[in-house]
Image: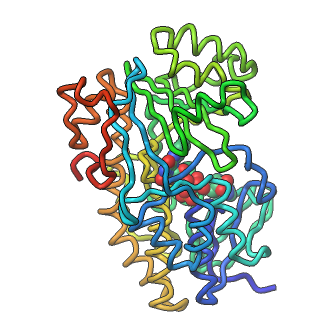
Amino acid sequence: MALPPIAILGAGPSGLTLARLLCLSSIPYTIFEREETAHARDYQGGTLDLHHATGQAALKEAGLFDRFKDLSRWDATTMIANKEGRVLVSLAPEGDEDARPEIDRKELRRLLLDSIPAESVRWASRVKEVTKELDRTMSVHLENGKVEAGFRLVVGADGACSKARSLVTSATLKYSGMHYLTSSIPTTSPHYRNVKALIGNGNYLALGSGKGIVAQRMGDGSYTANACLHLPEHWKTETNYMANPSKLRTWLLHDCFADWAKVNTDLIKHSEAGFRTWILYGLSEEDVHWEHVPGVTLVGDAAHVTPPSGEGVNAAMYDSLSLARLIIQHGIDNLDLAVTEYEKALFPRAVEHIKAGKMDELLFGDDAPYVWLRTVGIDVDGQEKRSGGEKVKMSEIELLGS
Ligand SMILES: Cc1cc2nc3c(=O)[nH]c(=O)nc-3n(C[C@H](O)[C@H](O)[C@H](O)COP(=O)(O)OP(=O)(O)OC[C@H]3O[C@@H](n4cnc5c(N)ncnc54)[C@H](O)[C@@H]3O)c2cc1C
């Protein structure tokens, strides 16, 4: 069977959004995804908030917005507390444009996957390398030894460790210094009622002394519980904590968060499952500009990964919206023109995205959360004034004054 002209590496939010939009215009493509099946990592990943002008816009153009509305939580409030457990501000959406509805990562994947033909995704296809051939076509080399050749365009939508990135830039990932250790509080937990009363349908971020305890409501009613810590890059392999969740929990409570309020540490104490680590990497501003290389481009985290800033999935889906529009506009015989125009618009957007990712340094700085709150325009000089958890419109929050 003839191969389609476009290969998409990765069935994450960016790859699947691009696939859906191309599919609507009958432009053929194949996705190569390393995971074994669509549900291989359902147990992973928390919730993602989709923004009006980016993530939601992509879903609208993809014809999936109504279904998204059913699957997402529109009343999610984000509370910022200090390590003493006092809620300083409560970020509440007001109106549709301000709203940042939350959707479980696995539900977003399911929504997108259900909208494209099942046979367009090649599961268990971990990409090892992408090469350019003498006839200018692109080949995708898989870890299992297979080589798929003859593509006119390879789109790297394969996240932070993209196998397509080295074709366009020598940029390498920088470790941010942060690990998130994620566990879960199920609905059956004896502590569940307290967590629900504290967090409701939204998110709770307790920040201070360069650390954080973050909890998020999931679609099934459970809560994720995250310990956010500055740790050595190879902490996971240099210690044996991950193999022993109860030892890890004790270490977190007694060594890392010993002087934190009970309302915060209870979120770790009453978490039940094992932990998953997120080791956070980023690219720098200089990395998100390259000379156009015909036959290959990047979208999403592959192009501009940053530590979580609440923008990543939105930027990723918007990249795909932007690229799909140009491919559709110029047609399958002018892919190079489409990609050139896409990248011209991508680079300044990506720089802004990387700047927003630096929010991480403020969220987990020594004087957190106060420095961050001031930076985004919330005056917390009179900390007592905010002790009631004053409500602030989402639109008042402008990351790093951007
Ligand atoms: C802990 C954490 C919390 C976050 N919270 C938020 C949030 O609240 N809001 C937000 O907007 N963003 C958030 N982000 C960022 C967001 O998850 C990413 O920006 C977004 O997922 C990027 O989408 P993507 O499709 O570009 O890449 P990914 O989501 O990384 O998808 C890449 C896909 O490619 C596949 N893949 C990888 N390598 C290969 C390979 N070699 N061969 C084949 N397939 C491969 C992967 O399995 C995956 O399916 C968070 C990130 C982290 C780590």
Q: Is residue 41 visible?
A: yes
Q: Is residue 140 above or below residue 193?
A: below
What percent of the width, then of the height, locates residue 194? 59, 28
Q: Residue at x 75, y 33 (%)?
A: 188
Image spot of residue 269 (x, y percent): 63, 19
- Figure quadrant of residue 145: bottom right
Q: Is residue 217 above or below residue 2?
A: above
Residue 259 placement: quadrant: top left
Where does the N terminus fall, quadrant-wise? bottom right
Specify whether 261 is left or right of 25: left
Residue drawn at 43 percent across, 75 percent down: 322
Horizontally, residue 356 falls left or right of residue 160, namely left
Total numbered circles: 0
* Relative image position of residue 254 (x, y in whole percent): 57, 8
Q: Residue 274 versus residue 234: which sits nearer the camera?
A: 274
The residue that appears at 37% across and 78% down in the rendered structure is 341
Q: Position of residue 208 (x, y in %)?
A: 38, 22
Q: In the depicted view, which residue is nearer to us: 327 or 193?
A: 193
Give 324 or 174, whichever is nearer the viewer.
324
Q: In the image, is 400 to the left or to the right of 318?
A: left
In this rendering, would 295 be left or right of 112?
A: left
Front residue (pair 115, 265): 265
Q: Residue at x 37, y 63 (%)?
A: 95
Judge whether 33 appears above or below 197 on screen.
Answer: below
Q: Is residue 79 above or below residue 139?
A: above
**Can residue 162 be seen from the camera position used here?**
no
Q: Toward which corner of the image does residue 239 lie, by quadrant?
A: top right
